[in-house]
Image (spheres, helix red, strand yellow):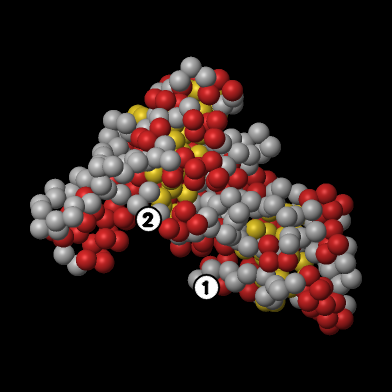
Amino acid sequence: MASPQKTVLFVQEPAAESQVMASARFADHYTPLYYTLSDKEAFLAFLQAEERRGTNIVAIYGGFAAFAWIGGLTADIIEGAGFPLATLRCIVLCSRGYNGFDLECLRKHGIALYNYQDAIADAALPAFQVDQVSNDVADCALWHVLEGFRKFSYQQEVLRGDGNTLRARARIAGYDDLSRFAFGHEVAPADAPAGHYAESPRGKRCLVLGLGSIGTQVALKLQHGLGMEVHYAKRTPLGAELQARYGWPFHPLDATLLEGGVLQQFHAIVVALPLTPETHHLVDARFLAQCRGPELVLVNVGRGTIVDSGAAEAALRAGRLRHLGTDVFHDEPVVDAVLREDTRGTTCTPHDGSATIELFTQSCELALMNILRATEGQGETKAEEPGARLCRVA
């Protein structure tokens, strides 16, 4: 008897125009099954019902959110009644992050987990763009940094409320007499604690904390896009070839960063680090006390808890920060009140720095391709291409 048609369970919708799903390689051999997650019990009940129907679930497409809605894919779900341990070969993600997955339990049951990686081109996807996620997140960081110096969003808010360019500039400058001419370089009353003038970022120094793929793209965009002098901090310096190529000064990411006035030289600091026990609350009150006081633009595109939000808010309110910009949040999905209320001194984006149609489509296609590689044939894996190996995390 022929084995039942292979089924891919989608807990998030893939890209509508997916070429992989439309291909004969997928469409002729796989049946898509869609499910919207709500809670663990309902999910397991759904799986039990599919088990009774004889559904041959060989892969789960997690997309970006994956199992976050139900607290992650934990051992009690993986080993729960109805979970397709006998047939499931892999779970694929569109995100790089895979927090919430019990990797040990997945390995125990021989279930592969693939995340998104774009450090090298994937030969199976001709339109694949290397470093797409890093490029898109770096765009977001660039915007926050520019906002910190120029305050365009705040100016836009005032202009939309007033409807007159001359009056809006006077309001932005803090003039009581709205008929008084304002050039536009003043962004607040003279007694404002910080950021009284719109400034050019050109020639100013920026420290990029973390120089992985995202940090590197941030540094390049700040240097070539805004004309900033870039420095970087990480545990070890770049290799000789890369150091010669970029020429950015290096600072060890250790206690010496807080000594000798190192941080005082920077007009902007961009956090592009992963979250580790060492980076948790790295940017705290002590760190900020060593910075350039009211001139500092602080931007976080790493992880929310790398910055102590209480310390950052205190510095902002005390006039020891020019600007706070962030795409990530300490208690995400909750956004701190100061970020919602202070439209002059802060900018925030809803953790969507990488959210472009290009990345959404590419990550979907890569995830689907990894399903094909892991489930085609009679048990052998076809996920040995360099790109697929890079994606496998369990």
Disc number lying in front (1 or 2): 2
The residue wearing badge 1 is 16
Above or below, comparing residue 89 to residue 300 in the picture = below
- Is 71 situated left or right of 221 in this image? right
**Residue on which the image places disc 2:** 343
Q: Residue at x 20, y 45 (%)?
A: 185
Residue found 30% across the figure and 49% down from its top: 151
Above or below 270: residue 32 = below
Image quarter of the N terminus: bottom right
Residue at 43 percent across and 41 percent down: it is: 318
Circle 1: residue type: Ala
Closest to the observer, 14 or 147: 147
Mark positioned earlier in the residue sequence (1 or 2): 1
> Where's residue 312, x and y in %?
50, 42
32, above or below 375, in the image: below
Q: Is residue 225 visible?
A: no
Q: In this orientation, which residue lies closer to the viewer: 7 or 273?
A: 273
Residue extending farthest to the top is 260
Nearer to me, 304 or 67? 304
- Image quadrant assignment for residue 156: bottom left
Q: Residues within 10 Å of mark 1 (few under 14, many from 20)?
A: few
Q: Report if residue 333 is visible in the image.
A: yes
Q: Position of residue 226 (x, y in %)?
A: 30, 39
Circle 2: residue type: Thr
